Image (cartoon, helix red, strand yellow):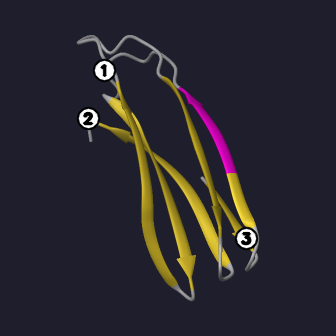
Amino acid sequence: MHEWTVPAGEALDLGAHFSTHDNAGLAEGFRALLYSTVEGQEEQFLTMSRAFDSASRDENADTTLLYRSKVEQETKFSLRLDSVGNE
């Protein structure tokens, strides 16, 4: 979805809001995954998920991800989204 690089000694201050459309039956929810890559080594370190509550799944889902961290080395971050269910 989105990638960016944070220089050594700087802070990442991330705020992301996610909202879905009510497409019943297409998915059971969604997942946001935050990855960091330092010196070519990628690591998934934060996962946020939102499952729909109703059996019909005919609803919207809203959630917000907030994350802040100072990096010691230049770090590439990537934020990815995928659906949960009906895969």
The amino acid on which the numbered mark 3 sits, given as a three-letter code, is Val
Out of 8 and 42, give the one closest to the viewer: 8
Query: Which residue type carries mark 2?
Result: Asn
Instruction: Residue type at mark 1: give it.
Output: Gly
Residue, x 50% and y 64% (percent of image)? 35
Would you name the residue on which mark 3 appears? Answer: 6
Secondary structure predominantly adopted by residues drawn in magenta: strand
- Magenta region: which residues? 14-19
Residue annotated with mark 1: 25
Q: Kindly state the secondary structure of the residue where label 1 is placed.
A: loop
Q: Earlier in the sequence, mark 3 or mark 1?
A: 3
Q: CA distance from mark 2 to mark 1?
A: 8 Å
Q: Write the residue at 55% across / 76% down.
A: 37
- Residue 5, image quadrant: bottom right
- The crowding category of the residue bearing disc 1, from other C-alpha atoms within 10 Å (few below 14, some 14 to 19, many at least 20), is few
Q: Position of 4 compared to 82: left or right? A: right
Residue 8, given in percent of the width and then of the height, sits at 73, 80
Disc 2 to disc 3, C-alpha distance? 35 Å
The correct choice, above or below, for 1 with respect to 75 in the image is: above
- Name the residue that disc number 2 marks: 86
Residue 69 belongs to magenta span: no
Distance in Å between CA atoms under marks 3 and 1: 39 Å
16 versus 28 height, above or below: below
Give the x, y percent position of residue 59: 42, 12
Q: Residue at x 43, y 65 (%)?
A: 44
Relative to 83, say whether 21 is above or below: above
